[in-house]
Amino acid sequence: ADLAFIAFFREHDNDLRKWAALTSEGLHIPGVAASDAPQNTFQTVICMGFVHLLPEPMTLLKALKAQVAPGGSIFLSSLVAGRSVGTRYLHLLHRAGEVAVPRTVEQLSAQLGGVPFTVQGNMAYAIINA
């Protein structure tokens, strides 16, 4: 099942936000029924370079946590405002409708319930253990 899911994402590598809906119930992908989504299954969930696209990142985190097996981990990364060039780039992307309102790492952490991040340049990284 994992390989089929990876193949699905490779086939549909266009902008995820255009064909997936993130709601308070979780991430909904056309062709994947909610009843088919494995709960508490994966030891590792990786969501790299995606969080900055979403206006409500906690909804994503809740959806990811539902997929992680006890003792598993979630790896997140996001662009964050901080350095001048990166911040200007984020604001430009936001004006173009490509990303959510730019956040600092402190704002992102607060929106995710205090998740600690490490920062390199304009990228923030977190490891969340289930």
Image (tube, rainbow, N blue to C red):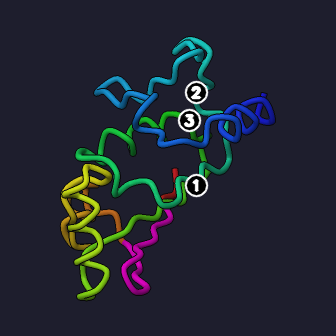
Task: Tell me the magenta residue range.
Answer: 117-127
Tell whether label 2 touches label 3 (CB within 8 Å): yes
Lower sequence index among marks 3 and 2: 2
Tell whether label 1 touches label 2 (CB within 8 Å): no
Q: Which element carries disc 3, helix, strand or loop?
A: helix
Tell whether label 1 touches label 3 (CB within 8 Å): no
Q: Nearer the viewer, residue 37 or 73?
A: 37
According to the picture, the residue beneath numbered tag 1 turns out to be 73
The residue sitting at 49% across, 34% down in the picture is 66
Q: CA distance from mark 3 to mark 1?
A: 10 Å
Specify whether 83 is left or right of 68: left
Does residue 116 lie above or below 49 as drawn? below
Does residue 13 lie above or below 96 as drawn? above
Mark 2 is surrounded, within 10 Å at the Cα level, by few (under 14), some (14 to 19) or many (20 or more) other residues, namely some
Q: Which element carries disc 1, helix, strand or loop?
A: strand
Number of the label disc, if any, that sits on residue 81 = none
Q: CA distance from mark 2 to mark 1?
A: 14 Å
According to the picture, the residue beneath numbered tag 2 turns out to be 39
Residue 27 % position (x, y): 43, 30
Q: Quadrant of the N terminus?
A: top right
The residue sitting at 21% across, 67% down in the picture is 91
According to the picture, the residue beneath numbered tag 3 turns out to be 67
User: Label 3 is placed on what type of residue?
Assistant: Gln
Residue 119 % position (x, y): 39, 82
Lower sequence index among marks 3 and 1: 3
Q: Which element carries disc 2, helix, strand or loop?
A: loop
